[in-house]
Amino acid sequence: MMFEVNLDKTKLGISFMHDKPQSALREPYCRTTKCILYGLTSNQAIKLAEGVSRCSWLDNFRKATGRKLALSAMKGLTREDRQKVWEVYLNRPRNQPKLPTAQRDVSGNVMEGP
């Protein structure tokens, strides 16, 4: 998924990718997160910069932490620009949680909970 960000009248796209190695060996870093910055034009996306974070096999993998570290590792963005990108990420539209469906009996009547 790509997020669109407008920085100084420039339309940019930010994409995050998570990678888990196929190897079962305990390597120093077991998962990585890439943050890729694209310049968006009317018909194409041009890769401008990339930042990578690595998660130790001793740590719990969390997407948000990996994304924040990968964004901070990206060269070419000021701190203020990274803050704007992070705000867009935090305020992104998310999938609405699914509401639980009612349990029904054989006749189709809604059953009362315990």
Image (cartoon, grey):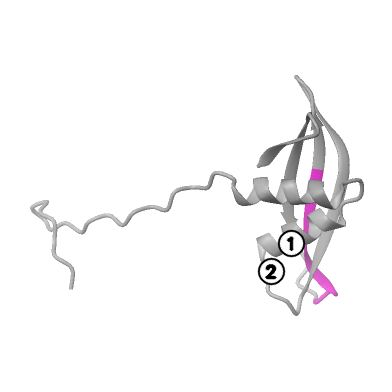
36 versus 101 height, above or below: above
Res. 61 mark: 2
Residue 42 place in picture, x, y as percent = 75, 19
Res. 99 mark: none
**Nearer to the camera, 99 or 8:** 8
26 versus 39 height, above or below: below
93 versus 99 height, above or below: above
Residue 70 place in picture, x, y as percent = 80, 57
Q: Amino acid at mark 1?
A: Gly
Q: Please tell me in which quadrant of the rendered image residue 8 appears.
A: top right
Quadrant the C terminus occupies: bottom left
Describe the element under mark 2 as helix, strand or loop.
loop
Q: Please tell me in which quadrant of the rendered image residue 30 appears.
A: bottom right
Principal SS element in the magenta part?
strand
Residue 51 place in picture, x, y as percent = 85, 53
Mark 2 burial class by Cα count in 10 Å: few <14, some 14-19, many 20+: some
Q: Amino acid at mark 2?
A: Phe
Q: Image point 75% across, 37% down: which residue?
A: 13
Q: Is residue 61 magenta?
A: no
**Nearer to the camera, 23 or 81:** 81
Which residue corresponds to mark 1? 66
Contact flag, marks 2 and 1 (Cβ < 8 Å): yes
Tell me the distance, in whole angstroms, between the alpha carbons under discs 2 and 1: 8 Å
Q: Which residues are magenta?
A: 26-36
